[in-house]
Structure formats: structure tokens, C-alpha cells
Image (cartoon, rainbow, N blue to C red):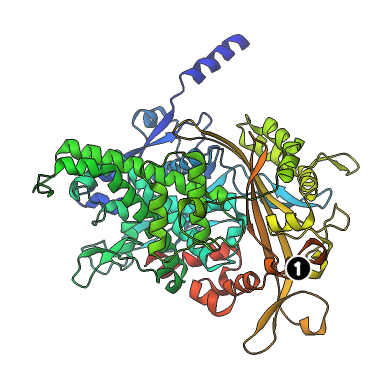
Amino acid sequence: MKKQDKKKKELASSTRPPFRELRGYAFDPLTSLDLDTAEINQITYKVPWEDDLGEGPDGEYIKVIDYDPASDAVYAPVDLNDPNLLASDGLTPSETNPQFHQQMVYAVIMITIQNFEKALGRKVIWSPAPMVDPKTKKFGYTYVKQLYVYPHGLRDQNAYYDPERKALLFGYYNATPVDASLYLPGGVVYSCLSHDIVAHETTHALLDSLYPTYMEVTHPDLAGFHEGFADLVALLQHFTHPEIVVNQIRLVKGKLDMENLLVKLAVEFGQSTGEHKSLRSAIGGEDKEGNWVKITPKTTDYDNQLECHDRGALLVAAVFDAFEAIYKSRTADLMRIASGSDGKQPDGELHPDLVNRLADEAAKAAGHVLNMCVRALDYCPPVDLTFGDYLRALITADKELVNYDTHHYRIAFINAFRKRGIFPQGIPNLSVDTVCYNLEIDDKIQDSFKKSYVLRQFKDKLAYVTDRKAIFDETNKFISGDEDSEGNVANSFHEALLSDLMKIPNGQLENLTGLVFSREYKKLGIRSSKTRTNQPAVWIQSMRLNNRIGPDGTALNQLIVTLIQTAKVVVVDKTDEERVVEPSMNKPEHRGLERFNFRGACTLIFDLDELKLKHAISKPIFDQDSAGPEKKRKLRLNQSRALLQYDSTNGELAEKIGIAAEGREPEEFLAHIHNNSSFFTL
């Protein structure tokens, strides 16, 4: 009997389909009410197959819980393994069927996760939850198996990711359109039925899984990055559905800078909340005559737009501008063939064969750009991310994996960011080689990493592990070490890595990472390590292994380690015009002042094949101008970064960003910036 069961299991594994086909909306229900778009709005999502998918759906990554607290209703969970649903590609799209709502959120979330895993070269693991061990009373983090998803989580014009509960909550509300011809007044609108909003919120959760510190708005760009990047993922995923791309390419005659559904986000929500336009349209809008026009970028845009949605729109516009330039480069020959000797396109519609070819090129370019955008996340600093930092991450990540940039993707990105006044700091020019991160490091330091057993061991232990919990447990064990019954710790990667780093002379190590390792740390408000005598505390936020294959077969096997160091500081007003940040001490002048955590951080990227450090991307906690020769070093806190961190969550700057004091807690931050008009209008 056991042999028969084993054979059945092997047969089931060999005949398992690669994906599960589920019907859903490509945009939102409103698009199905327009004769011009109804035929393309209902599509079939090809979702990665899950063997053990339960009712809900309840799968490996997410658990859909359909409880509606506003009406105290619990809706029956959908069973996507029902033979009838398997045979019919799931439930028919419906605004009134809660089980279809469950199917819709599951399909879009899983597609979004799949796109991230493809680009990152590893499994997605949700941000861990804080916990206190009931026995030892020690603080730590626990594995989060699933993201909880509530399709009807609130009765409000809102939807958001809650990092405390590790949950996505989607709202529903009664429409209040400016014109009854746009949407039924009083009709119920469900945010869980919008591809764009579901993808947007899922991206927030995915960003949190990589950098939990991005929930702390320590720079004006951070809230904008969260919003803009989430919009970008939703927008670029429009291009993964061939039938939609073909339809829209035909309507605009191959010109993506014209008004079309591919470049709009959440059309239904914009029209049902009193706006004629989509939720956000960073690329174009209506002029005074009501004609759609593409927004012309200005080099002053970045300096003048601080509000988080406006700031995020700049990121969306820059990336889409780069995508459009890439698309034009890829299709220039096709457009020349279609044009006459005078270079003008013929009147009427494009030939269907040409439309198909243009659509194919648009889909390929969008897929490449989406991969670039997600892949770049590994090359970002753990705190104070700026759009300039992100541009450098984009170019560096792409150059390392793709040797030949035949369509000039990298130049297109640099130019698109430059047009909007987005420039990386600390580089002499905007050439591709200069924008790339380049590490200058002593050969002796590199030799120390080649001798490090830590890098070899991490690769050996995790290179072929695919179970997400096993990856989490092994990584956690690697960082914290093995603890015996008496509480003694051995084999700690944290200690081993820091030991390797401490072999580097303090001055060089501090300049490399931007973190303090000398005994001056106490004078800067940095606490002592609990395990290393007379050494400053350094927190390993994360360790991530990626395995990526480039288009020419180039293989990258890397270990990404993020380090964070915290100084407890206060802001002291010296005069009406001068403020300074000082380490928080028991001084009379510090009494009554609000203390805050000023963070410095560094992302270390190791090449596991060559066993060398490739990049050290830092946000220094100390002023590097104060770092003199080894024997004369007298470090000072980085005043400009510390004050900007403080101002980004307090006072006038926080008001301009759009978060104010409500944005201090992660849950309040995302719920607040997504609430009502601030979420649903431009």
C-alpha cells in the first residue's frame, strides 16, 4: 500500500500543471461597462500552482480571511480545487459574489509575488513578527508563514498594508461620482476588485519584507518611494497580458505617450470618488480643454514636489519615461518599415501583424524594466533611501547581470531621472560607469574575506534550500548562532562576520561602512554590544542569498547583508536659526527634550563565487569629514542626516511630506497616506 501511495504521489508530481488558470479583471469592474474595453477587461491569470491550496484560498504565501467587521459577516471561503472551478478557470468575474472577490485578490497577489521572486532570484519571505520568548524573556523575531488578506476588511475609501498584523485590508464604499454617467451614484465599489490596488498593496508588503526600516519616514523620498514603487509594479504588470497590450497598441497606433489604459491606475476609484481621472496618473492628464497630454518634465520637479504622492509620481514618471524610450528603440525598425518614403504612417489602423509585433516588444520591454526595478532593491541602503540612490542601484544591478546593454536601457534611465532633477549625490558626472557603485578597497582586506569560512558556509547551507521556513530558520540560526541549554552561543555568523570586519583597521572599516567601530562610540550615543566587550552594537537587519542568471548566461551568486547602527540623540536649539544634534546624555539642557533614534546603515554585497566584497552602500552615522588619520580621528555625528531624519517625521517638513505625526507608527503611516482624498486623488 505504501508503494502504491508513493507511486501515486510521484505520478501527481509529474503531471502537476505549471499554473492554475483563474479568471479576473485586468483593471476593475468599471472597465467592463465600456464597449471599447469590455472585451479585454476579463482575462485569465496564470497563477503558480500550489499542491496544498486550501479553502480561502489558503496557500503557502497568503491566507484570505473574508470577515467583514463593518457588518459582522463571514463569507464562505472559495475552494479553487473544486473540479467545476478547475474546469472553468475559476469563478466568473462578478461584483456581487464574495467568493470571486477572494479569487481575484489571490490571483493578483500571487502574480505579484511571482514577479518579485523571478527578479530577485530567491523566495519571498515576509517580514518577521517581533516576539518575546516566554521562557527566556528574550526579545526576538518569529517566522511569518502567510500574509493575511481581508477582501472586505473595512468600510472606507481605503486599502492598506498593516505591518503589525502582517495583513492586507481592502475597503469598500458607496460611490459619489461627479457625474452620474461615469458611475452609479451610491453603487458599492470594492477595492479588492482593482488589479492596481491589490498589486499596489502587495508591493508595500514585499518592500517591508526586504527593508522594514523603510516604514520609518527618515527622508522625504521614503514615503514617496513606497507609493511610487507600488504604483510602478501595478502599472508595469498591465503589460504582462498580451490581449490588453494588443488592444491598446492598436488604439494608439503604437504610441505609448498617448492616453491609454496601460498608463492609468485604478480608473474605477478615480471616477467613483468624484474624479474624472484615474486614481493617479503620473504620466499625463487633461489640459484646460479636456484633452489628454503627456506631462513635460522639468529639472525643478524634484525640488518642488515634497508631498509623498507627488514625489512618488516623479518616480513613476521617470521610470515610465525610460520604458517608453526603450520601447521606441526596440520598435524603431518596425515603425520605419510601416512608414512610407516620406516617413509618415499611413492613415487608418495599423496592420494587425505590426500591432502584434509592437505589442510583443512593449511586453518584453516592460518585463525587462519591471525586473530591473525589483532587482535594484538589493542594491539600496537600509535607511534614508533617496531617488538618486535608487537610480544608482538600478544601473549597478543591471550592469552586473547584463553585460551588453544593446537597447541602452541604462542611458534611458539616467536621462529620465536627470530631466526631473533627480541626481545621485557625490559623483562627478552622469556616465553609466560613474553612476554605478564602485568599491575601492585594499587587496589585503579582500584577502581576509577569501579566508572567511562564513561566506563559504552560508552558500553551502542555503544554496539549494527551497522551503521558505527552512530558509528563515537557517538564516536566523546563522545570524544568532547555536545556543546550548545553559544559554551559551556558538557559531554565530553575527560574531564571525564582525570578527572578519574587525580585522580591518578601524579607520578603514568605518570609512567603508559609515558605522562606528572604535571606542568613541559611547560619545556618539551608540549603546554597547551585549556580546562583545567594549564594542558598539551593530544590528544585522537581514541576510539574503540571491542566484540570478542574465540573458547571456551570466550567473550571479551573492550574499546581501544589511547592517544598522543606532544612536540615541536629541535636537538642541542653539539659537533661533541654529540647531544641532547631540548624543542624549544626562545633561540639564537635555531634560525635557524628545529623544529619537538616529540610524546609520550599510548594505554589504558579497560575491560568493569569488569570495569578495563587491559593494558597501552606506548611510554614515558619523560625519566623514571628521574622520581624520587613524590616531587623530575624532568622530562627530552626521548632523545633516540626523536633522533630516528628525524633520521628516516632525514639524513643517513632515506636514509637507503628508505624514505629520500620524506617520510615526508603521500602521498609521500606510493607513494615513492611503486614507480618503489623499489616497484617491492626484
Image quarter in which the C terminus is found: bottom left
- From the viewer's perspective, is 665 left or right of 21? right
Q: Residue furthest right?
A: 486
Q: Residue at x 49, y 41 (%)?
A: 119
Q: Residue at x 76, y 35 (%)?
A: 453
Q: Is any atom of residue 321 visible in this view?
A: yes
- From the viewer's perspective, is 558 left or right of 528? left
- Residue 287, position in %: x, y? 23, 70
Work out whether residue 623 or residue 292 is closer to the camera in this orientation and state it: 623
Q: Is residue 512 above or below residue 14?
A: below
Q: What is the total number of numbered labels drawn onto the structure image?
A: 1
Q: Residue furthest bottom?
A: 576
- From the viewer's perspective, is 595 left or right of 92? right
Q: Is residue 444 above or below residue 629?
A: above
Image quarter in which the N terminus is found: top right
Q: Secondary structure at mark 1?
A: loop
- Residue 249, position in %: x, y? 23, 46
- From the viewer's perspective, is 400 left or right of 198? right
Q: Residue at x 42, y 41 (%)?
A: 107
The residue to which callout 1 is attached is: 635
Tell me where residue 187 sits by quadrant. Answer: bottom left
- Residue 165, position in %: x, y? 60, 54
- Residue 675, position in %: x, y? 46, 66
For badge 1, the amino acid type reads Leu
Q: Is any atom of residue 24 visible in this view?
A: no
Work out whether residue 85 or residue 210 is closer to the camera in this orientation and state it: 210
Q: Is residue 614 above or below residue 658?
A: above
**Mark 1: few/some/many CA within 10 Å (<14, 14-19, 20+):** many
Work out whether residue 498 or residue 666 is closer to the camera in this orientation and state it: 498
